[in-house]
Image (cartoon, rainbow, N blue to C red):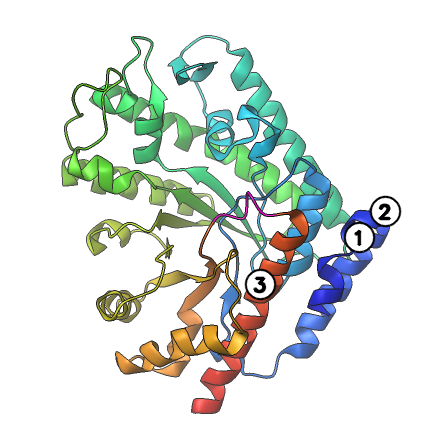
């Protein structure tokens, strides 16, 4: 079923695409040969190739429909207004940002670039609503991605040209503006996907550089002072509490970085993109799992061919060696290990299919080992 669906979208109209998505969901249900307690979910981190939002959402919904976790993809090839950073700026309440040659610059007045970002985000949500509306069953879960408050402070600039990271008051203002605007955006997503539980992913890919004080100033001649741990904890506590108050679940994506566990604890799940986990990595994974944290593990490399069995063995073997029970594999989700942005849409779709196949095989392996 996976391969047949993966390369079929471009020649179909929207109704036929919706039918294929329904067939995919039915096939997933029929393919499940394990108890729910062993279920391993598949998802992806957000980036997608091309400029066709309808095609992208349909492909993602088709491959990652229930029981897996689909998401609203980022199609940055459409321009600066379509990136996850622009989507995050579009969420701000009380702040605007001008798009300049040096990056996004915060201001308190009207910004045409922010307006374009808002229009793009709203259009993407409308596309999502249209695609879901043509499906026979409504999604149980849906994910959305934003840039987290720490990385926002490193990627946005003040009117004086310096990074927001350089000013404690500006850092707080940006965080609070994001939190204040989340309610309206999550409301729009709920209208697009009625009844779905929302998962909110915050990308903190600059986190270690911020903690280590290696982010350069705008001049490039020096670096900005490292954030103190108490401010990081405060940011994440305030952020995650606000998300939970909206009946959504906060997730943090730290990419390949090694981040102290204490910073990750406020989140429901942690996404990591480590290329080739070492024994020391698995020991840290075990500590997080034993503490009740969900983990999203980078598994399928879009640029390498690996069989489902090889991928399953690369997870299940180390999992048992560090003493974790098979039933706790339900605490992990599988993701891609590198961005899908520069793949073809057909190849990116096949990667998602490979993720769901691997997740299913891992679930069956866990059950058979008991």
Residue sitting nearer the eye, 16 or 330: 16
Q: Residue at x 62, y 78 (%)?
A: 32
In the picture, the quarter occupied by the N terminus is bottom right
Q: Is residue 329 above or below residue 259?
A: below
Q: Which residue is mark 2?
A: 13
Position of residue 117 measured from the top left corner of the image (x, y, whole percent): 56, 24
Q: Examine the image and state in which quarter residue 97 appears.
A: top left
Q: Which residue is mark 3?
A: 68
Q: For this view, does 308 lie left or right of residue 24?
A: left
Q: Is residue 250 above or below residue 53?
A: below
Position of residue 185 measured from the top left corner of the image (x, y, whole percent): 54, 34
Q: Mark 1: few, some, or many residues within 10 Å (few <14, many ≥20)?
A: many
Tag 1–tag 2 contact (CB < 8 Å) = yes
Q: Residue at x 62, y 27 (%)?
A: 120
Q: Which residue is mark 1?
A: 17
Position of residue 197 measured from the top left corner of the image (x, y, whole percent): 54, 54
The residue mark sitting in front, 3 or 2, is 2
The magenta-colored residue range is 339-343
């Amino acid at each position: 079923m996976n391969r047949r669906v993966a390369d079929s979208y471009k020649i179909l109209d929207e109704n036929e695409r919706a039918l294929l998505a329904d067939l995919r969901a039915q096939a997933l249900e029929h393919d499940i040969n394990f108890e729910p307690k062993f279920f391993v979910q598949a998802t992806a981190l957000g980036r997608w190739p091309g400029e066709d939002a309808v095609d992208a959402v349909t492909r993602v919904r088709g491959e990652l429909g229930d029981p897996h976790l689909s998401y609203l993809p980022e199609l940055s090839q459409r321009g600066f207004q379509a990136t996850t950073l622009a989507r995050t700026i579009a969420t701000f309440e009380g702040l605007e940002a001008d798009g300049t040659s040096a990056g996004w610059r915060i201001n308190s007045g009207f910004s045409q670039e922010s307006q374009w970002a808002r229009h793009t985000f709203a259009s993407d949500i409308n596309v999502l609503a249209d695609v879901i509306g043509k499906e026979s069953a409504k999604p149980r879960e849906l994910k959305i991605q934003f840039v987290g408050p720490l990385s926002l402070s490193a990627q946005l600039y003040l009117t004086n040209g310096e990074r927001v990271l350089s000013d404690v008051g500006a850092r707080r203002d940006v965080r609070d503006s994001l939190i204040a605007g989340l309610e309206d955006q999550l409301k729009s997503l709920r209208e697009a996907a009625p009844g779905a539980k929302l998962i909110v992913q915050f990308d903190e890919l600059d986190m270690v550089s911020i903690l280590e004080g290696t982010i350069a100033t705008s001049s490039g001649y020096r670096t900005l002072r490292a954030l103190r741990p108490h401010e990081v904890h405060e940011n994440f506590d305030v952020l995650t509490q606000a998300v939970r108050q909206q009946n959504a679940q906060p997730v943090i994506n730290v990419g390949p970085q090694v981040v102290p566990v204490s910073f990750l604890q406020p989140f429901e799940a942690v996404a990591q993109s480590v290329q080739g986990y070492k024994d020391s990595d698995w020991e840290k994974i075990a500590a997080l799992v034993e503490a009740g944290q969900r983990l999203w593990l980078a598994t399928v490399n879009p640029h390498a061919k690996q069989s489902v069995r090889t991928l399953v063995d690369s997870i299940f073997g180390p999992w048992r060696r560090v003493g974790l029970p098979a039933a706790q594999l339900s605490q992990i989700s599988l993701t891609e290990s590198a961005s899908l942005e520069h793949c073809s849409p057909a190849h990116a779709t096949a990667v998602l299919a490979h993720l769901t196949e691997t997740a299913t095989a891992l679930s069956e392996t866990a059950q058979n080992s008991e």
